Amino acid sequence: MAGMSSEPEPGLAPPHLSPTYEGDPVVLAVDGQDFRVGRRAGAPGTYDFDWLSGPHEYGFALSGARELSRPELEEAIRGFLAGIDPATGYLAE
């Protein structure tokens, strides 16, 4: 089709490539910032964090050998926020 590119474009992953989660993701408010946290199905100890209140669609993932407690999830979020450049809203270089 004319005008169609085969190059990937930014945006949401197609549903067949998006991870599935065990249970419903939860929203955690940490230091005035909101994050949706989902635990990936079939990948024990793997979490996706979506920064809901950030200036961009942005987030991070953690993978470990065990499930994390709520305080550990909050500490991971604080660590992420500590690395954000306030001028850009992205991780500092």
Image (tube, grey):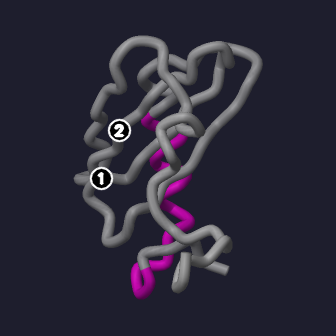
**Three-letter amino acid code at the position of disc 2:** Arg
| Residue with the most extreme right position | 65
Residue wearing tag 2: 36
Q: Position of residue 80 (x, y in %)?
A: 53, 54
Q: Nearer the viewer, residue 73 or 22?
A: 22
Q: Are marks 2 and 1 in contact (CB under 8 Å)?
A: yes
- Return the disc, 2 or 1, that comes first in the chain's sequence: 2
Does the magenta stretch mainly form a helix, a strand or a loop? helix
Q: Nearer the viewer, residue 40 or 86?
A: 40
Tell me if mark 1 has few (under 14), some (14-19) or many (20+) residues whose alpha carbon lies within 10 angstroms of its own.
some
Question: Going 31% across and 26% down the picture, which residue do you hit?
Answer: 26
Q: Position of residue 36 (x, y in %)?
A: 35, 38
- SS of the residue under disc 2: strand
Q: Nearer the viewer, residue 86 or 51?
A: 51
Magenta stretch holds residue 83: yes
User: Which residues make up the magenta segment?
Assistant: 74-88
Question: Going 49% across and 78% down the picture, which residue do you hit?
Answer: 85
Residue wearing tag 1: 52
Q: Is residue 41 left or right of residue 27?
A: right
Quadrant for residue 43, please give it.
top right
Q: Tell me the tag on residue 4.
A: none
- Report the quarter where the N terminus lies: bottom right
Q: Nearer the viewer, residue 49 or 6?
A: 6
- Report the quarter where the C terminus lies: bottom right
**Three-letter amino acid code at the position of disc 1:** Leu
